[in-house]
Image: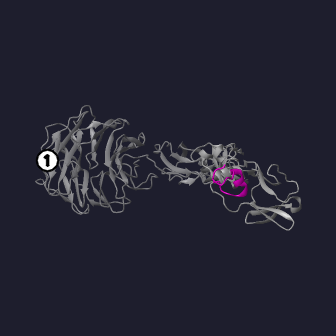
Amino acid sequence: MISFGRYLFAAASCFAALSLARGAVVQSDLVALTRTGSILVGISTAGEVKRSTNGGSSFSTVRNASSSALRNLESFSNTVVAIGDAGFIARSGDSGQSWSDLSVSAAPAFVGELRDVASKDGSFWVTVGKANGNLVTLWSDNGGATWNYGSVPGLSGTLHAVAYDTGTTRWTAVGSDGFFDARILNSTDGKTWSAVSVVGAAPLNDVSSNGAGRLLAVGDAGTLLVSVDGGQTFNADVNSGLVSENLNAVVSTSTGWAVGGDDLVQLNYPTAGSATVTQSPVPGGGAITTLAVDSGGEVLVVGEDFSGYQTITFSGPANQAFSSTPITLSATASSGLSVAFSVVSGPATVSGNQLSLTGAGTVTVRAEQSGNATYNPAPPVERSFVVSAPAATVSLGNLSATYDGTAKSVTATTMPTGLTVSITYAGSTTAPTNAGSYAVVATIIDPNYSGSASDTLVIAKASQTITFAPLADRPYSTTPITLTATASSELAVTFSATGSATVSGNELTLTGSGAVSVTATQAGNTNYASVSLTRSFVVSGGFESWRATNFTSSELADANVSGPNAVYGQDGLSNLLKYALGFSARTNVAEDLPEVSTTSSDWVYLYTRPTAITDVTYEVEVSTSLTSWSAVGVTHEIVSSSGGIDTWRARYPLSSATNAFFRLKISH
């Protein structure tokens, strides 16, 4: 927003250097103003040229009034040109310190007046006005030393203002036809001019360029005309007529244009368009006639008849954190009258000069002085400030949990206590159930406090157990063993085996004798940790194990080949006998067979067998005729055991028979 920063009051009032706070009056009677560097140069109502080197705090007269009244002036670098009635032109080359009046030959006199002057580059100048009731322009290409008539259409009226646009290198002059309509001229060189058609526009009083092809012209009854092509065409702005007062002056600023008019009305017109009122009309407050911008970018306002005008000084509160302690507002009126306060917008209330904050946000406070019999109402002053939410702390708890199928919420405590807190888990407001890590953000939801905390909620996987009964030692068998195990999670259990066995699903198949370890495993999932339990048992060799080791699958299927009574080799020994004595089925046994001998008292039958074989019974019988056999009288005993081989003997008394036959009977 453009704020009219300083007022230079004129005519029957005064000249002041003021911020929005409206400071002290320092000078009176100016009707025109320009800036050259940091120096201000103005024209008084008496026609004097005055100069200030201290930003307008004080002015000194540098040229006395002449018989032809001066109306306006403009500067470029150190050159200042002043123009006035009857074509009068004065010039300064030292920032308005010293002046020379141009001769008639240098600036031809005529019946009429010059209203405005502008320069393109300090060398080329244009001034406009009226002569003999018609539009007139003059131009100079030597820094304003000599002047020539421009070529203009033969139109009645007065040109009130002229501007040069560097972006399009075009000149634009605006004015009126002397009655109710606007006049606009445009030129590419400042010498030859053509009329710009504009229908139904009220008389125009000033025009300003932003130097990039955009121009704003202002006039009677709040007229705002905009050009985007260097002044070749103009159109009414959407907010033309926003105020009904005459608009008298416009100046380009860093953000657009500042506009001033009758009854102190002031507008801001940003570069993007759409005017807004920055100072509402003050009936009887006086007319703004000229605007300028000082070296700091602040707008200077020159006006007429500001008698009875008062201003308000109000700095407003600074940006601050929310507090319940009321803020004391302070403002003064230049009239000395009391100032009233109101809240325009934002989280605050006011009682007298006590402002109470109700929350965080932007607060706008207005200071007003309604006037009295001597003073007009002061232009209200609005001040905005930001109320920030004070910091509060949030502490998070319950950040560790174990999965159990229920949602796991963290706890949040605040300081101050009891503040509402919004909690999200990995971006969701729903507390999680499944195991995992979740980014937790806790944010205070309170109009008067701000604060947040972040951490990580970790839900660990639940442990589980396996029920798997021990497996008993057993002899070898080809029949599969069905395994059974369950997990406390009710998830499926898998089996694996090491040793003399294989597993398919839950079926354990023995592959021989020896140690077997079976492991029941539940691998876990998102919410459960893995677990396993191993059971071990011993498979004794057994005849079936021996068969599986000695025969192929096809031979095992044929009892005539692998059966217990079958004789595989050429040694005449059955498979069961070879197994019992520790021989291979495929070996033709010729050695280590049982032997018969005698001692002084006994017949002796001696043989060896594997210690580990437990699934057969050994019995030694004796016969004297080979027709009947009996174990009666036979002593069967172990002699020794070494390296997994036992040596056994059977004794039968010599006294019982003069001859004896022994046989080893194997039962399975």
User: What is the count of numbered marks?
Assistant: 1
Q: Does 651 sit above or below residue 339? A: below
Measuring 21% from the left and 62% from the top, which residue is drawn there? 93
Q: Position of residue 193 (x, y in %)?
A: 15, 43
- Mark 1: amino acid: Lys
Residue placed farthest to the bottom in the image? 600
Residue 458 seen from this side: no
Q: Nearer the viewer, residue 579 or 598?
A: 598
Measuring 56% from the left and 46% from the top, which residue is drawn there? 427
Q: In the displayed structure, does residue 346 sit left or right of residue 626?
A: left
Q: In the displayed structure, does residue 510 sit left or right of residue 179?
A: right
Q: Position of residue 351 (x, y in %)?
A: 61, 45
Q: Does 204 sit above or below residue 616? A: above
Q: Nearer the viewer, residue 359 or 246?
A: 359
Q: Residues within 10 Å of mark 1 (few under 14, many from 20)?
A: some
Residue annotated with mark 1: 191
Q: Which structural element holds mark 1?
A: loop
Residue 16 seen from this side: yes
The part of the chain drawn in magenta is 567-585
User: Magenta region, mostly helix, strand or loop?
Assistant: loop
Corner quadrant of residue 598:
bottom right
Q: Position of residue 264 (x, y in %)?
A: 39, 44
Q: Nearer the viewer, residue 171 or 411?
A: 411
Q: Does 464 sit above or below residue 281? A: below
Q: Position of residue 400 (x, y in %)?
A: 67, 53
Q: Inspect the magenta stretch and tell me whether residue 591 lies in it.
A: no
Q: In the displayed structure, does residue 12 sit left or right of residue 167?
A: right
**Is the image coloured rainbow, by chain, by secondary structure, or in one colour?**
one colour
Q: Nearer the viewer, residue 144 or 524?
A: 524
